[in-house]
Image (cartoon, rainbow, N blue to C red):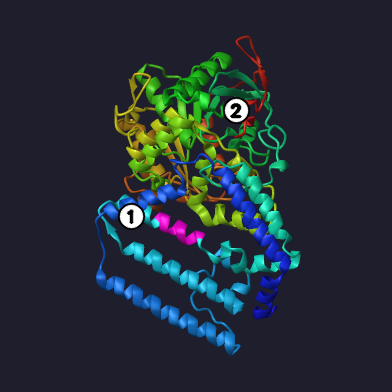
Amino acid sequence: MVNQSDHFEQLFSSPLVKEVAEGFLNLLDNSLSHAMRNRHDRLTPKAILENLIKQWREQPVQMDAAQLIKLQMDFMENQRQLWQQVGQAFFKKQTLSQFTDEGERDPRFQDSDWNTEPVFYFLKQAYLLNAKMLEDLVEQFEFKDPQFKQQTKFFTRQFVSALSPANFAYSNPEVCREILKSKGSNLLKGMENLVRDLKQSPADALNILQTDLEAFELGTNLAATPGEVIYQNDLMQLIQYTPDTKKCLQRPLLFVPPFINKYYILDLDHKKSMVHWLVKQGFTVFMISWVNPSAQMADKQFDDYMLQGPVAALDAVEAITGENKINTAGYCVGGMLLATTQSYLQNIGDERINSMTFFTTLLDYDEPGEIGNFISEQILSHLEKETGTHGVLDGRILGMSFSLLRENNLYWPFYINNYLKGETPSAFDILYWNSDATNLPANTFNFYIRNAYLNNCFVEAGSVILNEVPINLSTINLPTYFVAPKADHIVLWESAYQSARRLGDGISRQAAMKRFILAGSGHIAGIINPAESGKYPYWACDSSVGNEGLPEDPHAWLNEATKVEGSWWCDWYHWLAGLSGDKVDAQKVGIHPDFPALEPAPGSYVKVRI
């Protein structure tokens, strides 16, 4: 173990390290100046925080004075004990004991020096004490608006996470050792990584590279299930996948992926690809692949996404297969679009959708989870002004917002590894997909955020009107299958459950046609849980509670549910196969005269990167 005083003397006295640090700061300053040009009046993180502070000043806030004094006294006593312990360890060479178990399992502080070297130990423990003090203080605040309290807690957490000593070169023992070992070359490499990422970032966010982009190619080791693009318009391409069996189930399956992401989360490599697995099971699978819109598409409405997306796809699928009953599946916001499409079609007498499956979908946005912390009337008004100016919402900003929901897993570790350690991210297919952002047309984004997250209009009958038709999700009368991952941080499973209850709740017999599945893991891994490996379990309810209807309390449902080891894909297969008719001869792809093969899957729309 390096002596602590020698360690710091070597670290700070090295001329090369000083030179590297000065060069890093100069280049960072120049790069930021370049990146920030023309960013006046933009919705920056600073602008969001300033808006929050302004609201905080205007909000009536209450707090128990006695509790405040107690928090302060406890904090001072803990600081005294910490100083005493570190002083004894530093000067009397006493062994450090665990001052608090806070952070014991925190992945940021797993290096042994955080617990054995007095200076790093003090930095860690002082940080954790201050973090706890701030979080406990905010917890004691009572605001008139409960949502504002949640926003205050969320942004306090972001502030606390950003100030972790692990995020700074000279207070992170791993980085310090790397500087000495490499004689500062890790900082040079980190500087190069930062400049690279700044060039690929929008003005409002730092888009940190999370994976090796050179390791993947669409159509080769991702999105590689054989098929053809057989239809396209200016919003989407429609892919029909090549059958892998001589006989296929009669009724086709149409996927509606989220229009804020690329579709190939459902078609990763063959071991993880849901599409590949379904084709192997004998399903005729169609997939919508959304365009990555430019500013020229600013006027595209939510209605357009419905009419040129699911409705146009249904027309093509029916014409190609000859089937007028089509099973459908929607992922995340794609599920919300699917539900509104069915309400629209039902109201105009179109009965082509045979069943709907929803993967981690919100229809009722009453409890939207931590994403709601980014939403307020003030922030949305600013966003509407900005998207109106630029024509689109930059998908990279949306991606960063999602990463900050789990900042200590999806943001700061990459910041440390890329910029402080100078490392290159390893290859990871899901993170490659996550970094492949999609823009949203201004009108579509503004309509969606205001009617969903801000005002929760979609569950109010007639509050949303699409193509002059009022939307009423409560009258939908179809077999439905809902999957909600238990650890989802984007769509809370309890909110997905309530969404399942709201769909068709005006139809008495609809309850018997619903099946709700609680999957293990999170927003992505809970859905992409291949049948062969079945890494995560799921919970299903086959009792009378599950058949007669979903009880109001999701935890009451969970108490009745049974945990099943393995992937929920197998359960879904049996449910879906029962709605898919008999086996028929497989059709060749791309031979229909009105829907010929335009280009091989995955098509060209999905390959457009920001």
> Taking 517 as reference, is 213 left or right?
right
Q: Is residue 478 above or below residue 23?
A: above
Label 2 amino acid? Phe
| Residue shown at 60% from the left, 38% from the top | 436
Confirm whether residue 205 shows in the render. yes
Question: Can you identify the residue that label 1 sits on?
Answer: 149
Q: Where on the picture, by quarter, is residue 216?
A: top right
Q: Residues within 10 Å of mark 1 (few under 14, many from 20)?
A: some
Q: Residues within 10 Å of mark 2 (few under 14, many from 20)?
A: many
Is residue 479 shown to the viewer in this render?
no
Q: Quadrant of residue 501?
A: top left
In the image, the segment drawn in magenta is 154-162
Mark 2 or 1: in front is: 1
Q: Please give the name of the residue rendered at 53% of the width and 57% of the height, measured from the top-left corner.
A: 408
**Could you say where residue 27 lies in the image, as x and y percent from the top left?**
64, 52
Q: Three-letter amino acid code at disc 1?
A: Lys
- Check disc 2 and report the residue beneath it: 283
